[in-house]
Image: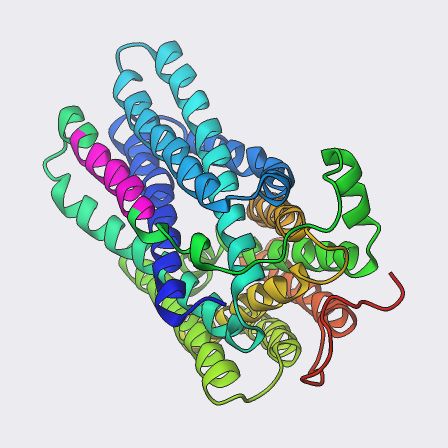
Amino acid sequence: MLSWLSIVRMGLVQMCLGAIVVLTTSTLNRLMVVELALPAVLPGLLVALHYGIQITRPQWGYRSDTGGHRTRWIIGGMAILAAGGFSAALGVVLLPGSFALGLTVSILAYALIGVGVGASGTSLLALLATATHPRRRAAAATITWLMMILGIAVTAGVVGSLLDPYSPALLLKIVGVVTLGAVALTAVAVQGIEARLTITAPTEAPVPFLDGLREVWAERKARNFTLFVFLSMTAYFMQELILEPYAGLVFAFTPGQSTSLSGAQNGGVFLGMVTVGLCATGLKLGALRSWVIAGCLGSAAALIAIAMLGQAGPGAPLLPAVITLGYMNGVFAVAAIGSMMQLAGEGRDSREGTRMGLWGAAQAIAAGFGGLLGAAAADLLRHLVDSDATAFGTVFLFEAALFLVSGAIALRVVDGPRPASADPALVPGE
């Protein structure tokens, strides 16, 4: 089983993933829209492409299941991600001189980013799922995701400060350092971890990918958990593109105030993640299913409050409601990830990577779909009704309903406490 040090080392890989991906969602996005005066839909579609490519996650999980040596997929995927990250920066540099060439390079780059995240991230989670003691899974999920958030925050802040004054050469230099550093740190972080683990060899001969995927899909829990991941993550990401506009249009927040609001929400996410890690693993308070359901119900309640506050307008206490939403989102996210690692080992042997890939694909599709659905629904409703508060509030209420449905599914799909002697590989009725 993984030691705490090994879990932290694997968290460094998540930190590297976040460090490269945030360059595309923040720095390069801003350069295209502001410095190059391109329509915001362009970077939005490129980011959606990288999410769409991650539908290949089940394939990467299957490869790591059947071929073994997940370490090489983790490092190789990070190398592909790094190549995509640097190519994305190169595409931005090429756009002013030749839009067609720059766009072509950018499309290829974001496709590589999707492949890299899928290969490295899925293999990492599969290794965590197979080698983490059940009692440590909530803490492992907390550690790895907090380190990813750390990588996102530190990279965004440092790159932002170093990039001023902006020049294309400086951009390529900084992105080159970040991407090469991520590959090097990943290789060092995972070196030797898998070799020291005692993992049971597969008891069956490898089957073709589609057959393996069908076998996993035939498992009731795996199928229902896929639905849970898609619905809950759609709800999670629906507010991503509309919360700050809502604060500005309905509550008269300035750009600086709405940015601070987003920061406060992320602070709440951080606290929620820490809470689950400390309570579920350190203090042994509550099963993961209880934390998942609590996170879903709490997120729904916070969204309902945010929608209702819109009717009061400027001066209403939006900030506490948004912090609460972030906190409950953090509780839900870490508990769901811990449950994912727990369920990945249930059912047919040697399918952990395939299951993690299936759920990762559902999460990636939901992330892209949820953000676009929230923004499109808000735009449509603003044209249909006279009140911005009602338009946005309706979207938040729909999001709350999705969280309630997700909580009901979690009640049936996620395991509650089980006897210490129970064999997690035995899943009745499948």
* Residue lying furthest right: 429
Q: Number of labelled discs?
A: 0
Q: Identify the residue at horizontal 45%, vertical 72% (top origin).
A: 273
The answer to whether residue 82 shows anywhere in this view is: yes
Q: Nearer the viewer, residue 262 or 355?
A: 355
Q: In the shown orientation, is residue 157 left or right of residue 306? A: left
User: Residue 153 falls in which quadrant of the image?
Assistant: bottom left
Residue at 78 percent of width and 61 percent of height: 221
Residue at (14%, 25%) from the top-left corner? 169
Q: Is residue 185 above or below residue 112?
A: below
Residue 77 falls left or right of residue 183? right
Whether residue 315 is visible to the viewer of this picture, yes or no, is: no
What type of secondary structure mainly makes up the magenta span? Answer: helix
Q: Is residue 361 magenta?
A: no
| Residues shaded magenta | 173-187
Residue 188: percent from left, percent from top: 29, 48
The residue lying toward the viewer, choosing from 145 and 330, is 145
- 178 magenta-colored: yes
Residue at the spot 48% in from the left edge and 66% down from the top edge: 141
The residue lying toward the viewer, choosing from 289 and 191, is 191
Question: What percent of the width, then of the height, locates residue 193?
Answer: 40, 56
* Quadrant of the image containing the C terminus: bottom right
Above or below, 23 relative to 416: above
- From the viewer's perspective, is residue 101 above or below residue 272? above
Q: In the rendered view, does 131 fall on the left or right side of 88?
A: right
Give the percent coordinates (x, y) of residue 16.
33, 48
